[in-house]
Image: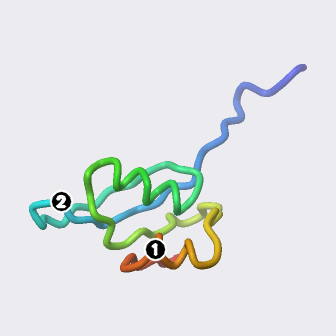
Amino acid sequence: MAGNDNLTTSMPQFSYRARRRSGELVQGMVDVADRAAALTQIERLGLLPVAVDAARGAEILTGIKGEHARDHFAGVQVRDD
């Protein structure tokens, strides 16, 4: 047997709260590799991230370190449940 077709690999999920350009608060979920990718995806949707939370059971990989991380996450609340 070469492999098991019943096994699937899923990406971590991140829930977010963000604001539209109009100021409206929106919520959603993204399936991405890490927090940095979550922020990028949210911004690509034309939203300003307010909070990004790892979903329960998600494997968390930051991917950004040092000074760049502080600049990238400035103003974003990040919590692990």
Q: Residue at x 50, y 64 (%)?
A: 55
Left or right: residue 3 compared with residue 49: right
Q: Residue at x 21, y 65 (%)?
A: 19
Q: Are marks 2 and 1 in contact (CB under 8 Å)?
A: no
- What color scheme is it? rainbow
Left or right: residue 78 compared with residue 63: left
Relative to 74, residue 52 above or below:
above
Dot 2 surroundings within 10 Å: few (below 14), some, or many (20 or more)?
few
Q: Position of residue 57 (x, y in %)?
A: 60, 63
Q: Tell me the SS state at disc 2.
A: loop
Instruction: Using the rendered image of the protein, determine whether residue 60 is visible from the camera's viewpoint.
Output: no
Q: Nearer the viewer, residue 13 or 71?
A: 71
The residue wearing badge 2 is 20
Q: Residue furthest right?
A: 1
Relative to 37, residue 3 above or below:
above
Left or right: residue 17 compared with residue 20: right
Of marks 2 and 1, the one in the foreground: 1
Q: Which mark is residue 73?
A: 1
- Marks 2 and 1, how far apart in space? 18 Å
Amino acid type, label 2: Arg
Q: Residue at x 55, y 73 (%)?
A: 69
